[in-house]
Image (cartoon, rainbow, N blue to C red):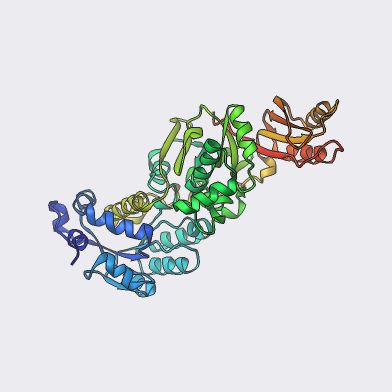
């Protein structure tokens, strides 16, 4: 037996832990996060038992590569390729789903719930797409679905919103919740490199997948934001209504211009409560350089939550990685263990609000969002151009806050505008009118500005 297995099954010094049967865990997947979960459970077994009131043991693992898993965990745990057999195993109390995707994972999670087992998952895509179905099934069966690791890795943002801020009417949440894109944007700013070069480096360093689409196009962040919006505002999970815009088309020159204007560009997930409905959007945005979020660099994550009573609170840390994410998985295991015998009606609701109190508030289309804007357009350097563009903006009720003009290395001039707050639909109409004029040489580059005040 390996040292890890010995530690995992050793008796804790806690009297409570010694007097109760251990909670038995079935691990679906032993990849980066699954391996980290095994390691953390093994290394901190006694401390975890003291916190949970009983030992937490991995009793069974289902993986694709049995031999690879066996080399990590030794001979003391049953390892097979059959996930369905694992979730049906009567010895298993908690199923930890770490296989990813939303097809097989959905089948196994729903089957585990039907078998009366609690579920812990790090799968944001699964919950963003099928969370309403999964949470309803769990409530009906009287089991828990815990998902701290699904958002922002090791940062306990789910627990903070669901429990720590329950006295508050949450006003908005804004976060850097994808480390890959934050690393790319940080490198583009600090080193002056184009997107493609930094993406290649991110892939070489392991920050980006071979197919980085989910990360760089904002889909991963939108999965996470969808869950945060549900927790913050007590609405069903509605990923299909999120506005998503990535960073793959972001030009190095706009990062440089933003820097000169006193801003940094970050891929933000933003959800706001408004009288007309809820904003749910992911996109690159200019953030004032003095804001804390603007100074989150590299692959780190940070989430800013504003409540009416507490004001703004910031949560910062590693949003991915083996042990940071495993930290959140194990925290969920401890929570489930503590509440295992509690009456289901007295547990913390999955989405912070009681299931029958969720409200189907409208998710606003992006055209109804109001924010400030950065607009850049390349024009012929001739008299009257600036006045004509200003007139188009004014006709749509868009006020210019500041403007700079830069000679273009390919001829003409770049005009860069920072607007006051305006409605997105009005900005769309103004851009279409500007692009149709004879003196414009390029499409208008439009980025949103978030002051986070």
Q: What residue is drawn where x is 71% and y is 35%?
A: 376
Can see residue 202?
Answer: yes
Q: Indicate the quadrant containing the C terminus: top left, top right, bottom left or bottom right.
A: top right
Up the image or down, 80 lies above or below 327; here it is below
| The image quarter in which residue 69 lies | bottom left
Give percent across and percent down for residue 24. 26, 64
Up the image or down, 348 lies above or below 393; here it is below
Which one is nearer the viewer's eye here, 346 or 172? Answer: 172
| The image quarter in which residue 337 lies | bottom left
Q: What residue is drawn where x is 51% and y is 59%?
A: 210
Up the image or down, 142 lies above or below 368; here it is below
Give percent across and percent down for residue 201. 50, 49
Give percent across and percent down for residue 449. 62, 34
Give percent across and percent down for residue 335. 31, 51
Q: Indicate the quadrant containing the N terminus: top left, top right, bottom left or bottom right.
A: bottom left
Q: What is the number of callouts on the image?
A: 0
Q: Which residue is at the far front?
A: 409
| In this rendering, position of residue 420 left or right of residue 441 | left
Q: What residue is drawn where x is 36% and y is 74%?
A: 81
Which one is nearer the viewer's eye here, 176 or 174? Answer: 176
| The image quarter in which residue 418 lies | top right
Up the image or down, 417 lies above or below 216; here it is above
| In this rendering, position of residue 246 left or right of residue 93 | right
Which one is nearer the viewer's eye here, 11 or 69? Answer: 69
Can see residue 236?
Answer: no
| In this rendering, position of residue 391 left or right of residue 29 | right
């Amino acid at each position: 037996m390996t040292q890890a297995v010995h530690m995992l099954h050793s008796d804790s010094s806690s009297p409570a832990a010694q007097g109760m049967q251990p909670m038995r865990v079935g691990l679906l997947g032993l990849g980066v996060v699954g391996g980290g979960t095994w390691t953390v459970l093994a290394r901190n077994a006694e401390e975890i038992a003291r916190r949970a009131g009983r030992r937490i043991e991995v009793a069974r693992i289902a993986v694709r590569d049995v031999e690879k898993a066996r080399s990590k965990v030794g001979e003391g745990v049953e390892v097979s390729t059959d996930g369905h057999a694992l979730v049906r195993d009567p010895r298993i109390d908690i199923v930890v789903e770490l296989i990813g995707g939303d097809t097989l994972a959905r089948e196994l999670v729903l089957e585990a719930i039907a078998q009366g087992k609690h579920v812990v998952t790090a799968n944001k895509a699964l919950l963003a797409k099928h969370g309403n179905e999964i949470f309803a099934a769990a409530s009906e069966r009287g089991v828990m679905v815990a998902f701290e690791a699904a958002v922002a890795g090791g940062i306990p943002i789910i627990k903070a919103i669901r429990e720590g801020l329950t006295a508050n009417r949450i006003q908005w949440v804004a976060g850097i919740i994808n480390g890959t894109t934050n690393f790319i944007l940080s490198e583009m700013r600090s080193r002056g490199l184009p997107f493609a070069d930094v993406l290649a480096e991110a892939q070489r360093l392991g920050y980006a997948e071979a197919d980085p689409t989910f990360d760089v196009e904002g889909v991963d962040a939108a999965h996470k934001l969808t869950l945060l919006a549900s927790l913050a505002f007590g609405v069903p999970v509605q990923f299909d209504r999120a506005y998503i815009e990535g960073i793959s088309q972001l030009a190095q020159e706009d990062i440089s211009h933003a820097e000169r204007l006193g801003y940094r560009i970050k891929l933000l997930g933003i959800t706001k409560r408004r009288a007309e409905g809820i904003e749910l959007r992911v996109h690159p945005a200019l953030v004032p350089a003095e804001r804390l979020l603007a100074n989150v660099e590299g692959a780190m994550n940070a989430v800013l939550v504003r409540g009416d009573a507490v004001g703004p609170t910031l949560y910062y840390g590693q949003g991915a990685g083996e042990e940071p994410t495993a930290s959140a998985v194990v925290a969920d295991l401890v929570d489930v263990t503590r509440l295992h015998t509690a009456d289901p009606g007295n547990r913390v609701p999955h989405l912070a609000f009681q299931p029958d109190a969720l409200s189907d508030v409208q998710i606003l289309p992006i055209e109804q969002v109001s924010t400030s804007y950065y607009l850049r357009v390349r024009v012929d350097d001739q008299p009257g151009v600036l006045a004509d563009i200003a007139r188009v903006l004014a006709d749509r009720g868009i006020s210019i806050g500041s403007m700079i003009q830069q000679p273009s290395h390919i001829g003409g001039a770049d005009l860069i505008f920072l607007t006051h707050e305006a409605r997105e639909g009005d900005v769309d109409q103004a851009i279409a009118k500007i692009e149709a004029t004879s003196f414009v040489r390029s499409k208008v580059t439009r980025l949103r500005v978030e002051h986070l005040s």
